[in-house]
Each structure stands twice: as C-alpha cells, then as structure tokens.
Amino acid sequence: MPEISLPILLQGLHGSPYTRKMLAVLRFKRLPYRFMIGMPNMPAVPGSDADRSRLPVPKVPLLPTFYLPDEQGELQAVTDSTPLIRRIEASYPDRSVLPDDPVMAFLNDLIEDYADEWLTRCMFHYRWTYPPDIEKSGSILPLLQRVDLPAHVLAGFKQQFSERQISRLHVVGSNELTAPVIEDSYVRFLACMDAMLQDGQFVLGNRPSSADFALMGQLTCLTHFDPTPMRICEERAPRTYAWVERAEDLCGYEVTATDWRAPDACNESLITFLQEIARTHMPQMLANARAVAAGEKAFETEVDGRAWRQPSFPYQAKCLRWTRDAYESLAAGNRRAAREILLQSGLLPLLEDAIGN
C-alpha cells in the first residue's frame, strides 16, 4: 500500500469508542492529523472543509472514517480500526503499538479483538438498556455533531436516534436472556483490568499496545459517560477509571523496546484476563462462525454456562479467521509458546475447534 501522507485526514465523533481509540493511537505516535467532526454521510457541520464534497463516502458509513490513498493515489474512505492501525504502522513504525515479540503481538491481537467485539457489547447494552443512560445518550450524543441544534430539532433527533439504537440491541446480542451474562462479564473485566494495572502501566507491560487503545476506546463510554457502568467502575475499579483518563493522550509518554512484557513473563493477572476472554468472548465467536458457515441467520449457545442467543454476524466470523491465520503464520517455536499460553488460559478451542465441513 502507498505511504500515508501527513497530516492524516479522518472524520468521526467523540461519542464513538472507535474514534477515541484511533485518536489516542495517533496522539501516542505523535502523528499530525486533521480531525473532522461529523458523519461522512450527513450534511456538513460548522467548521467543515468547504470542499468536503470531494471526499469519498464509505459503502457503510462507520466511525471513524479515514481518507487514505489507494494504489493509484486516489483517496479512499477506510473504516476498520484494526487494519488501519497496521497500515499506519507500516508507514510510521516509530513508537509502535504492536509488540516486537511475535507471541506477544498475537496476544495483543486477541485482546484487541475482545475489546472491539465483546466489550463493545457491554457498552451498547448499558447505554441503551437503562433509562438514565438512554436519557443522557439521547440528549447529548446528537449535540456532539453540532451544539447549535434548535431545541425542537434536538427533541426530534433524540427520540428518533434513541429508538433506532434501542431497536438494534438484539443485533449485538443484548436481550433479556443475555443481559445478566453481559453485565457479569463487565464486572469481572473491571476486576481483571484493575489487577493488571497493579502489575504494570498497560496490559502487556509498561508501554501501550493497540489492545490498550481498543480497551480504552470502549471504556471512554463505559467508565466516563454512561451513568450505570460508570458508577460500577468508580466503586469497583478506580485504577481503571484513572487509567482511561491517562490513556487518551500519551504523546508525552516515553517508551523503550524493553517495556514490552516477554512471553515467559505473562503474569497471573494477564492469564486471568485471558481466561475471562475464554469464558465469554470465545464461546459466542465459535458459535457465530459455525452459524455463518452454515448460512444460519441466528445462533444459540452457552456463554459462562448460561444460554446465549443472537443474530449471526459475518464480520465476527472474519475476525476469527484472521485470528487463526495469525496463529498459523507464527514460526514453529513461537506457535508452541503461544499454544502453551492459550492452553493455560483455556483459549485453545478458539484456534482448534472445528467450524464447518
């Protein structure tokens, strides 16, 4: 892919956890960027580039949207945060957010996927399930695009936006059956996170990885915006609350290559966190992949020993395939080391269980 020119151009909203994830990565790497507030498929907001119409629109409008050159030098709208980070790293490897050690890089990928695909369920569930969270989100999120909305417009937008989001709860797997599973997993995650932060500044040592920024992005909503999960965090995980505040802007945080944890130094708190991923994220990932392979529109399984039901999601089946491909691409010695960690944490089925014929 062609090198990314500076400043990097992107569009998003501060209420988007993936936008916050990517802004934090750019700040840490000290890369100049131009952040345009708004959605790519909506009218321009005050302060927009007068020539905004020249920018391509993604097939599916997602946040954040980056505008990067293709092989012919034409701007393309790119939206997936995980491959975006890898592409940015290819052009600007300084202050890397990907561990040097292949085994730790693989674990980083696993944790980043958990944050992007499971922890976001917790975020969406709390935000659109409880009345105080619905009220705050419906009132404030529309104003993040433009603060001068007339009162009557805001009221209409609030109702329309809230109803649409609530109607989509089932898509991420939030329903009466799964709600206790999601909420218990959030409480356990906070305990895991607070324990890891007693062992180091970040999840994989004393420098941030893309997994840290993925976790932080979801937590900017869970611990710093939505009332119900924020109260839980304040009561149970004060270190995590403080960590989110710090992790949003680490441009002044100095790092060295030795700040990464080595595979043979995976401590108890990290293994416990990986066991949590095996307990919650892994069962539904496998069941979803089987459903997608069979052409089924929904699936049922057990997560944490309790019933789980939701629509199947082809993108998450791709995520599982990418994880398996990353594992298979490891050199034999690194694969053995990774397998030992996965065996210890109960994650081996994620890579070895059969998916389809």
Image (cartoon, rainbow, N blue to C red):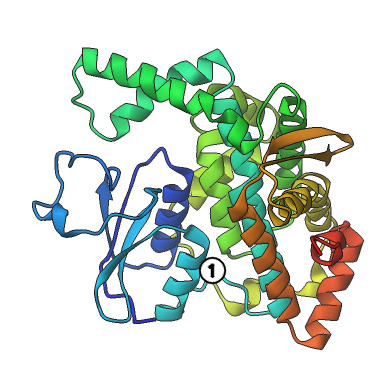
**Which quadrant of the view contains residue 7?**
bottom left
Q: Which residue is mark 1?
A: 97
Q: Position of residue 99 (x, y in %)?
A: 62, 74
Q: Nearer the viewer, residue 150 or 263?
A: 150
Q: Position of residue 341 (x, y in %)?
A: 85, 67
Asked if residue 56 lies left or right of residue 125, the reply is left
Residue at the location (59% across, 65% down)? 207
- Counting labels gives 1
- The image shows residue 259, relative to residue 224, as above or below, that is below
Asked if residue 179 lies left or right of residue 335, the reply is left
Q: State the quadrant of the C terminus.
A: bottom right
Q: Position of residue 340 (x, y in %)?
A: 89, 71
Q: Amino acid at mark 1?
A: Val
The reply to whether residue 229 is visible in this rendering is yes
* SS at circle 1: loop
Residue at the location (34% across, 68% down)? 31
Asked if residue 313 lies left or right of residue 155, the reply is right
